Amino acid sequence: MNLPARVRVTRPPLPLAAALKVAAARLCPAAPLDALTGAALAIAGGAVIGAHLRWHDGEAAAVETGWRGRGIEEALAQALTSPDAP
């Protein structure tokens, strides 16, 4: 998948670290961050610009407005579903 040069997608360990939790809450405010079963985050320039979060009975995804439509949404979904993604 071709992402903008500054963007990387990662699957952080759960539970999320405090700074990542704040960023995820900003992007997906309805997500139960203490009950996540999976998370993929897009990072650009040290800032979280996208998140795809999964919990027992739901999921949520969001990408900051200026970054939408550049393949980030697809990369987040693929990272969360792929067992061998980083």
Image (spheres, rainbow, N blue to C red):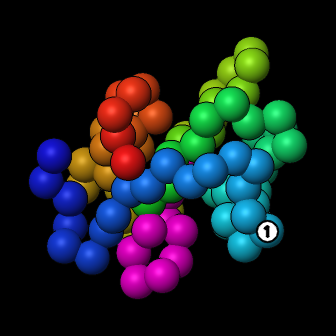
Q: Residue furthest bottom?
A: 45
Q: For residue 49: magenta?
A: yes
Q: Is residue 63 left or right of residue 16?
A: left
The percent coordinates of residue 1 (x first, y second) are 16, 46
Q: Residue furthest left?
A: 2
Q: Is residue 40 left or right of residue 73?
A: right
Magenta: main secondary structure equals: strand
Q: For residue 54: magenta?
A: no
Q: Which residue is mark 1?
A: 18
Task: Choose top left, top right, bottom left or bottom right for residue 65.
Answer: bottom left
The percent coordinates of residue 7 (x first, y second) are 31, 68
Q: Look at label 1 and name its amino acid.
A: Ala
Residue placed most toward the observer, 27 or 34? 34
The percent coordinates of residue 66 (x first, y second) are 39, 68
The percent coordinates of residue 76 (x first, y second) are 40, 43
Q: Is residue 49 left or right of residue 25?
A: left
Residue placed most toward the observer, 56 or 4? 56
Say which residue appears at 73% left-offset and 64% top-offset: 17
Say which residue appears at 25% left-offset and 49% top-offset: 71
Eyeballing the image, is 20 above or below 38?
Answer: below
Q: Is residue 55 visible?
A: yes
Say which residue appears at 72% left-offset and 55% top-offset: 16
- Helix, strand, or loop for circle 1? helix
Range covered by the magenta-colored residues: 43-51
